[in-house]
Amino acid sequence: MFALLATQLGSLVAPAYACGCGAMVPDGFSRIGVARETSVVRWDGRTEQIVMRFTVGGDAKRAAWIMPVPSRAGVELGDPDLIPELGRLTRPESKTRTYFWPRDRDWPFSSGRLDGAGAAQPGAPSVGVVGRERLGDFDVARLTATDPNALGEWLESNDFKLPDRLAAELKPYVDRKWEYVAVRLAPREQGATLGGELDPLRISFASDRLVYPMRLSRLAKSAQALGLYVLADHRMELASPIGGAAPEVTFAGTVTPQGSLAEFTGSAAPVFLTAIDQRFPDPSRIDGDHELRATAKDTPFRRVVYRDELLTAGGVPVWSLTVAGALVVVAGTAVTLLSVRRSRRRRPPTAATEPLAD
């Protein structure tokens, strides 16, 4: 048995930071913040797999995190190359578009730049330890609980106290007979603090619907950011924003798995990938877990990032050539008109002739 969630509660208590998939709590009076959570979700209609990676900051040397899951879960380290690979697959398409007239950063307005870059069974113990593993920088326990108070008592009996608010938020999961993945984050290097991108964790469990636990994030003290890569047979969408900003689809399309992605999906067969970003400016408004469903059509989408450039010809701005050409035409016309006018002034008068007599 080992400590899962760590915080020393007293007259001064370090705030509990939540992340998009559960709750993360630092030890003692140290602080930890989850700046962003990125997860890959794979669902085949029966089994769900989640690979998650946290980007954290703060001064905590240890922290603990808990994630509710609808059924018995398996936990292992995830492939660190998976999320970067999906990032490359879904990066925006880059296009260049030109503009004619100079802008603020173009000559003559600047220094001369020509571009515009820019389930527990009855009778079972109230809390059960299903398994325990050491995975890299993580100690992982898989728990069952039929009573939220018993879960809190178990944690407290192991020298850690579950914050009251977090215990209350676990009750809906206990009522639905969900289980829990509890993780202690402790760097193997003595004295090291938790910071930057942590090793990814891979969690798998049986599920007849695609769910992503989010309810515990309502305890977060600062705005949360969530990035989801969803791999399924069809394009997927969030059934509800659950109190966050409107989700933004940043990519949707069929991809052919290779490398880390093929290893994750277990096949090189094409799969539909949907990338979704969502922000939670006020986490206290989160009112449930994410459920995802197939959209009516598998409409592909890719973001386009435009790079604006000043229209040039041979390295010279076309607007300047046009203006110069116009000035030449105006000057030429003026010279022509002036020449005609002068020639008229210099022409001698024509002598008058008298009519001939009969």
Image: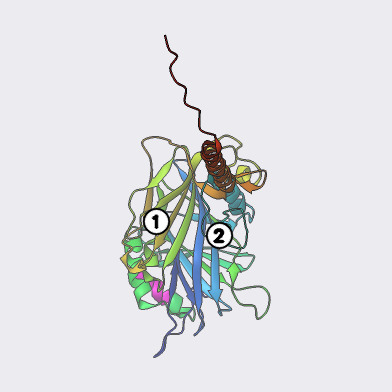
Where is 2 relative to 49, above or below?
A: below
- Of labels 2 and 1, earlier in sequence is 2
Which dot marks residue 105? Answer: 2
Q: Quadrant of the C terminus?
A: top left
Label 2 residue SS: loop
For image coordinates 35% across by 77% down, the residue present is 164
In the rendered image, residue 202, in percent from the top left (x then y), is placed at: 56, 55
Quarter of the image for residue 234 reads: top left
Given residues 284 and 202, the one toward you in this image is 284
What is the residue that sits farthest to the front in this orientation? 357
Q: Where is residue 193 in the image (x, y as percent from the top left)?
A: 61, 77
Out of 327 and 23, give the one closest to the viewer: 327
Judge whether residue 270 is colored magenta. no
Residue flagged by tag 1: what amino acid is it?
Answer: Ala
Q: Is residue 229 visible?
A: yes
Q: How far apart are marks 2 and 1 (CA)?
A: 63 Å
Task: Measuring from the top left, give residue 214's x and y in whole percent.
Answer: 40, 60
Camera-side residue: 71 or 287? 287
Residue 126, placed above or below residue 229:
below
Q: For mark 1, does the 10 Å Cα neighbourhood hold few (<14), some (14 to 19), or many (20 or more) residues?
A: some
102 vs 66: above or below: above
- Find disc 1 in the rendering and name its residue: 119
Task: Give the magenta part as a residue range.
Answer: 148-154
- Name the chief secondary structure element in magenta: helix
Amino acid marked by disc 2: Arg
Judged left or right of residue 188, residue 298 is left
Q: Is residue 149 magenta?
A: yes
